[in-house]
Image: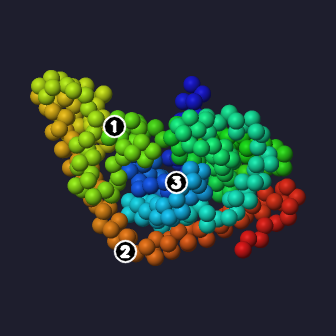
Amino acid sequence: MAGHKLRQKIEYRIENFDLRVLSGIQPSGRLHIGNYFGAMRQHLQLQADHDCFYFIADFHALTSNPEPGDIARYTLDVAMDYIALGLDTDKTVFWRQSDVPEVTELTWLLSCVTPMGLLQRCVSFKDKVAQGLAPNHGLFAYPVLQAADILIYKSDLVPVGADQKQHIEVTRDIAGRFNNDYGVVFTIPEAHIIESVAVVPGTDGRKMSKSYDNTIEIFEPEESLRKKIMRIVTDSTPVAEPKDPDRCNVFALLRLVASPQELADWENRYRTGGTGYSEAKKRLAELVIDYFKPFREKRADLEHNSAYVRDVLAEGARRARAVAGQTLTAVRNAMGLGAYYGR
């Protein structure tokens, strides 16, 4: 009941106030439709009515030790994808995380008030190590950098999936401890849990993820996209037999791109029988291509104008630093270090 009331409170605030919304996305590969329906679409919707700060989290991406050339290329790819899909570069502050050095200083200052036990309880570190990622201090201390990202811009809301809710709770705990010890400096953020879309399945049925190599990229070449969709794992139910749409990976993706009327028709065909998965896959490919078709031309244009994209990120960093510098000055003064003057 308490969680329901909190969700209602957050939803009410989103509908009625111009809040500062912050989110970041790692440049760990080409973005896929799971990224879009899982988070990006909500980011783009929120910018219409709120003060949005979105960054490309290249510092966070370093915890998995990527190749230098890859992180630079993927950062530019992420920026192009967001702009092509409708990011308002005039209204929304959009930048590369490493272009705001203030966040790294704040990370150290917050580390000095963060109990070890708080980090040791974070399940994300344990999960990633269990998945085979080599443990390093950056991976362990990831929540402190994330807290600095959120707090330095005085964020009100942080849109996250349910699996990241604990990190926002850690941020709230760190901010509360600082405010209690040094006086009220930080805004205490709230998590805006993205619940409108269920887990987007990949071609193998697991959650769509670059780490599983089961993704369908947003701007994938059409022929490649069709081939991937035709390889989506399904069960062995014969064509003539009824099928359960709620247990079908193809139908789960149809939910994202088909109209309500067409989706109802597909559900009826599934439950009646006589329709094969191959037919559904072919239609899914057409719908995915049509859904992103309006953005493909702009994405192609941006590939030939990378200077513009870099200018957008540079201007975003300038705007982000203006806010970050003010917060860092307040933090330094509170801790007895003196004002921050920046570069």
What amino acid is labelled 2 in the image?
His
Q: Is residue 243 left or right of residue 153?
A: left
What amino acid is labelled 1 in the image?
Asp
Q: Which residue is mark 2?
A: 304
The residue that appears at 75% across and 35% down in the rendered structure is 117
Q: Which residue is mark 1?
A: 204
Q: Is residue 106 left or right of residue 52?
A: right
Which label's residue is closer to the chain start, 3 or 2?
Answer: 3
Q: Position of residue 290 (x, y in %)?
A: 24, 54
Farthest-out residue, top: 241
Q: Secondary structure at mark 2?
A: loop
The residue that appears at 45% across and 45% down in the rendered structure is 211
Viewer-nearest residue: 266 or 222: 222
Label 2 Cα neighbours within 10 Å, binned few <14 / some 14-19 / many ≥20: few
Q: Is residue 304 above or below residue 78?
A: below
- In the picture, residue 62 is in which quadrant? bottom right
Which label's residue is closer to the chain start, 2 or 1?
Answer: 1
Q: Position of residue 243 (x, y in %)?
A: 21, 25
Q: Which label is found at residue 55?
A: none
Viewer-nearest residue: 326 or 149: 149
Q: Which residue is mark 3?
A: 26
